[in-house]
Image (cartoon, coloured by chain):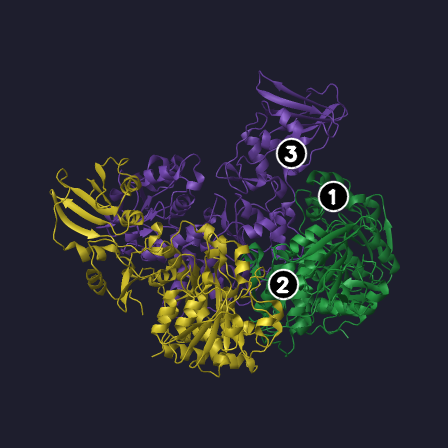
Chain colours: A yellow, B green, C purple
Amino acid sequence: MTDFKNRDIISITDFTRDEILSLCQTASKMYDLEKSGRRYSLRDALKNRSLASMFYEPSTRTRTSFNTAIRELGGSHDGFAGTEGTSIMKKETIRDTIMMMESNHFDVGVMRNPLDGSVQWAADVAKIPLINGGDGKNEHPTQSLLDIFTIYMMNGKKLDNISIGFGGDLSHGRTIRSLSMALSHFDNITIRWAAEDFLGMPKDLEDLLKSKHVKVERSEKVRDVMKNVQFYYMTRPQTERMKGVSQKDIIKMMQNYRIDLAKVDGFDLRLMHPLPINSEIAEIDYRVYFRPCQAFFQQAENGIFLRKALLYEMLSHDDYVQSDGTLNPATEFGNNHLQRAIKSRLKEHMFIDNIKRGMVLDHLAYGSAQDIVQKLGLMDREYFFVPASIPQSKKSFIKTDLSELTERECKEIAIRSPDPTINIIDQGDVQSKFVYLLCKNDNCITRAINEDVPPSFYEDEGVIRCRYCRRPYASSNPKVSEAELKSFVQSLPKSVNPL
Amino acid sequence: MTDFKNRDIISITDFTRDEILSLCQTASKMYDLEKSGRRYSLRDALKNRSLASMFYEPSTRTRTSFNTAIRELGGSHDGFAGTEGTSIMKKETIRDTIMMMESNHFDVGVMRNPLDGSVQWAADVAKIPLINGGDGKNEHPTQSLLDIFTIYMMNGKKLDNISIGFGGDLSHGRTIRSLSMALSHFDNITIRWAAEDFLGMPKDLEDLLKSKHVKVERSEKVRDVMKNVQFYYMTRPQTERMKGVSQKDIIKMMQNYRIDLAKVDGFDLRLMHPLPINSEIAEIDYRVYFRPCQAFFQQAENGIFLRKALLYEMLSHDDYVQSDGTLNPATEFGNNHLQRAIKSRLKEHMFIDNIKRGMVLDHLAYGSAQDIVQKLGLMDREYFFVPASIPQSKKSFIKTDLSELTERECKEIAIRSPDPTINIIDQGDVQSKFVYLLCKNDNCITRAINEDVPPSFYEDEGVIRCRYCRRPYASSNPKVSEAELKSFVQSLPKSVNPL
Amino acid sequence: MTDFKNRDIISITDFTRDEILSLCQTASKMYDLEKSGRRYSLRDALKNRSLASMFYEPSTRTRTSFNTAIRELGGSHDGFAGTEGTSIMKKETIRDTIMMMESNHFDVGVMRNPLDGSVQWAADVAKIPLINGGDGKNEHPTQSLLDIFTIYMMNGKKLDNISIGFGGDLSHGRTIRSLSMALSHFDNITIRWAAEDFLGMPKDLEDLLKSKHVKVERSEKVRDVMKNVQFYYMTRPQTERMKGVSQKDIIKMMQNYRIDLAKVDGFDLRLMHPLPINSEIAEIDYRVYFRPCQAFFQQAENGIFLRKALLYEMLSHDDYVQSDGTLNPATEFGNNHLQRAIKSRLKEHMFIDNIKRGMVLDHLAYGSAQDIVQKLGLMDREYFFVPASIPQSKKSFIKTDLSELTERECKEIAIRSPDPTINIIDQGDVQSKFVYLLCKNDNCITRAINEDVPPSFYEDEGVIRCRYCRRPYASSNPKVSEAELKSFVQSLPKSVNPL
């Protein structure tokens, strides 16, 4: 029921209540081993196993924590980190890099990459299991798990009946969202928070939590939160994700919400923080570090135990995954599927009077036609084309005798104009038509042209989501109904479906 | 007597004569093991022990040498190096980073950081022992120890009765100073040197050495030194520490002092150099590399033996140091202590006629008041303030109804105006007054605002020194007498005192 | 006969037919061990051995592959990679760095460096064996060996009777040249290729292959090649080595030569590529990755087996190489040798009327005299000098009373004017004369002034070649005959001669 053997660890939302509890129990054993002085009793558990450490962005904290975990279990690690790694590989796809690393006989990989959904894609390609060490603004599941584990340990090894306060920046980071979603599996959870409006809890998250029977209450003052909770989880304002807001503005916003002695003294609670603390904003005053409430360094150490537990559950068996030089065939097919979904519709006559073979790109964003003509190089390649705009219906279209589009060309069109309708014309008639569906999250890996990641979607509780970044998808094209989309998604092959 | 178990290694000056000899003896055994082919007989000595390698500045030489040492004793290493590591952590304090690394279950750390005193601070924070791998311009004790060990090995395993020549740059680096201070423990030491005035031995070092019965003699020519010494220690001009001096100037200065065949041929001595040799200046000509006098590559290898000896002495016992998530409480208190030292003085009436509650910042550097007002943001924060300058006494002062200063604010004032007197006013009267003491070395870690390192001092042979960068401290404030300072320093708690 | 014990691995051309076959056999055993699940049976083969990984340029692929190889044999690795490593050492010579690394008790090193010939130089200096991981545009022998090994494995463990196609860029990289030279050892080899003229097979390579009885045939179209070969080896256009050619030009040139489904479908062959594939040019379309012909990820994995075989053959014996702090004396002597070669010629009277002691630099490139005067600093150093140019003979000369030249000064002259004749004048007469010989490859390590690498040459099948970059050398100085050069080279000491 809670089997982690060779399983990819992509999102905290993939974990059930039982899985979270089971991991906490194993991590707790790891903690006991260490603290009782039997530190090395599992030193050979993962002997001869190795971890591929693939950090496209620099990281000391997460990287060192994983390295310590595999080291203490007797395994080894190797890989790349930071700009150096990326500079050499700037024109190599993630797919090729992951295949290359897999061919180096690693047993498991941890990957951080700035693109949302990139680790899911890497996991689809790789045969070895992968762990998400942070994909863009998206997910960092081992952080959420170690947060939960810390609460578990400091709450008598139970996760029901928790009251927790949130502070700092509830809006721009992934930490608060992931942690509160993970907590929502448990009974009688109360979340209280106090923060500036700009940094406060997003409405959609509040609604979601309430739908899962989590109590959410906002307070005016930090001390009002403090006096009513067992845990206070402080976070760093994610200034790098706030365009047009200066460091000075942030310091001002934080003035009433910084954690200092005046805020914590007199309360019996544990103060958590995912670290690092920004020493300029000083969202936690250094005098607080010496108070008994300070729990964030124990929280950091707990990351080791949690990661040891995870690696142990994933790898302490005898079934080695071996590279055989071939790719997962499920990663080949992209919009071919999507195309099939719509192309059985009735053909229509439209603007095709004077071409025998070619296509009409229709329902384009108003005014985008000229840019698309340029990007496809229709003039250079000496194709006939008519870009047109229809002011009444606020749309544009392009008629051309170009008769084939590559996947990359489809993406270039959809990046400029979401959900284009593509009509294939042959023998003077529309032979088939389809709408090209592409995730609308700018930072999604499916929009990185050179990566060749096939757009893919799945249905989750009635919502169509991108397989990679997991953002909800809604078509803006009047030719695609919600029902059609769902029936199409249900018809997709299951092999690359999420857990 | 010479117990290195879990001891921090910060400065060569912390080592006694016996400790130096004892380390040399252990290192000599490490040398014999290697050279007699029994290379691997200590392969399990530090099994399951691990070294945290924390290089905020790039280093290949020192880092690789420590890595080899721990590897040959059966331990492992991990950590970060160079700009990559620092870029991610640019707003994290050293304190937080060291706590994070400690929570990763390392048994010992080596750290290099550009701030003077930074490794002492890290050692105060950390529970695991730390080794200074270079703190700014300050110290690099394992370099000095391997230099001493090289002399020991090449002088029949004795350190008395040594004659050594110094060349290159005696003024801008730490190597010559540290080595000669270490040698001063031994009997009948003679130092001879020849260099340009600008690169010559500093007067204070010469005086210090003479007070310790070391003979120091300057010669006109390098050959005059060569013919009278057993060892010649050449160093690289530290161009990066000479403002306004060009590479070309240096090459010219070095013209008569470069070591080439004409300088060494005919003498029986051993030529040392800490490496790297600058290939543009070529302070040692490459033809000399092939002469029997060349000892610097053996010196480099000796670094392995010395570091193995040190790690072995520090860690080959069964008492593991464990992180428990709490900080050393002695690192909390800073000027609170200092404040107490002076605040029992008699209260004085001064400029306080029109405020009931607030403070007077007095004895400020002439003309600094306006800058301090700005930095404290008195106008923005809508405090009443009067900045004033008194030409006759060449001082400035500020009167304000701001009644509290944070530690960071005290530092901002003292950076702009050393040793300010701070008068706390309440009920229309001076309730207490104190002088804020802050080390005057610009590169000292106590002056790095965000690091929150409490200023701390100790008395050593009658001199008050900064605990971190170890520079002598003298107050420029007429309100603080030397005697008061000393009696204050003696009253400091001993827990963070140097060895 | 095929003994790799402690042998330097510099160039694929150093390998005999038997050596290649022998390595393939050992690598094949490594493959079988892994694939039969006995992955760890050699885990202790190189226990306590360590690999120095010295990458002056970033590399993920080669570095990780070597790391995996040594790890799976039970050894360890350490070293430096990329700009970080080089920035700290930018003024340290390769010689000093290699001596420093050797003093760290590594048993073998792999090195990548941008200068041609740099790894041969490092190998001359080091006592431990070195492997070339890429020296500039020159060589990368383990890549060629793994390519050969891949063919061996996919051709029933035989290397005779091979037909192979080449595509992409046959002209600007080293891969095609090295692989085809290695194949030329075997019987009945046929090479077919199709590419743009600009990217096609160089005439000299074609001639060389034909002289070794390799069949070489060009086809118009890629499919014409495909239908007649067992293997197709695709390469990435080396845009970084094509001055004045844009990425766009390259994409256009590649239009008919990219490998896509239309090119491979219907043929029974194996598609190879050294990786990485450039995702912008996409010289192999991603749809091809899923076809059974795709062999490049297996090829990447084969790199592990080949490198394991190589390290195993080099190091699985009991003779440790130990650093003793001294340099290989053969690396000391440079042009001293060369000078001897010519200086026994008859003295001549020339332009020397008014100097008693000094020199005449003769046969200088027309117009180069003034630049040389400047570089030698003759004016600053207050030497007498007459730079002159003789339009009739299109040469320049310099007369000066400077009477000695350092090796670095000789190089500075020869960089500005190849093969200068240097006449040493004493007592008013030419006492000796010699021609200073320096490799003419701009990127050769012997031309990097600060590196102090002595120019050195050897004769190979009648051609004089630079010992380091192995480029053919021909003098442009009328005073040096081909016969003289050869007889001189034959008289060189053998100690640093190539294998």
Residue type at mark 2 is Phe
Give residue A402's quadrant in the image: top left
Q: Chain of mark 3?
A: C
The location of residue B427, given as percent across then percent down, is 73, 68
Residue at mark 1 to residue at mark 2: CA–CA distance:
32 Å
Residue most extreme to the front: B354
Would you name the residue on which mark 3 appears?
C410
Q: Which mark is residue B260?
A: 1
**Horizontal side, residue C403 vs residue C257: left or right:** right
Circle 1 or circle 2, nearest the eye: 2
Would you name the residue on which mark 2 appears?
B66
Residue under the image location 56 percent in, 45 percent down: C497
CB contact under 8 Å: marks 1 and 2: no
Residue at mark 3 to residue at mark 2: CA–CA distance:
40 Å
Give residue B188's quadrant in the image: bottom right
The location of residue B286, given as percent across then percent down, is 68, 45
Residue type at mark 3 is Cys
Q: Which mark is residue B179?
A: none
Q: Residues within 10 Å of mark 3 (few under 14, many from 20)?
A: some
The location of residue A85, given as percent across then percent down, is 47, 54
